[in-house]
Image (cartoon, rainbow, N blue to C red):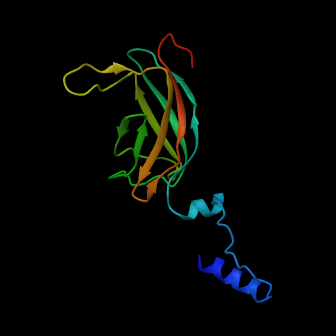
Amino acid sequence: MIAARAMILAVAFGVTPVVACAPARRASTPAQAATDGRPRISRLEPGSVRLIRGNVTEFDIRGSGFDTSRTSPGNTVRIGQVVLTSVPSRENGTLIRVALPDAVPSGGEAPPSPWMGGRYPVSVQTRAGTSDTLFLVIASAGGNP
């Protein structure tokens, strides 16, 4: 509001107004992103899994900034509504291997229910913050990814 009044006064007195603007803030570059300490997910391997009843399926989360503590891992992995705590990382905090069961807890005394086929958001949280989100495609037995 003050800048608008100053411009009106400048024009009224025959002075060419000069407007100073702060430069727009750039989006983080990968180099800047790596310095803020948050974990980063670069890819899921594989990005699509088929679950078979009675089996556990593994997939890898590749990235950087995962907690490397061996005695008290500080990685929390979220896959949809499922939260896995104290998940260890490997390869100097660039790999988390996740064992995905064929069913998820239902809560209470209800039996576990099978995963529904679909896309599930995956993120990693450490003491330094929460990663970006990638999606894992899950196909239950007999389904298509």
Q: Position of residue 57 (x, y in %)?
A: 46, 25
Q: Along the line of sight, which residue is nearer the eye, 45 or 13?
A: 13
Relative placement, left or right, of 134 versus 10 is left
Q: Quadrant of the C terminus?
A: top right
Q: Is residue 65 above or below residue 57?
A: below
Q: Position of residue 46 (x, y in %)?
A: 58, 30
Which residue is nearer to you in this view: 94 or 114?
114
Q: Residue furthest left?
A: 109
**Relative to the observer, which residue lies in front, 53 or 120?**
120
Coordinates of residue 95 in the picture (x, y in percent): 52, 45
Task: Give above or below for 2 relative to 113.
Answer: below
For the point 41% across and 19% down, which residue is it?
A: 55
Percent from the top left, x then y, of residue 76?
Answer: 39, 46
Which residue lies at the image location 52% right of the left edge and 13% below the top edge?
A: 143
Identify the residue at the far front of this view. Answer: 12
Residue at left 40%, top 14%? 53
Q: Quadrant of residue 116?
A: top left
Number of numbered tags placed on the structure image: 0
Q: Is residue 40 above or below residue 5?
A: above
Q: Residue at x 52, y 43 (%)?
A: 133
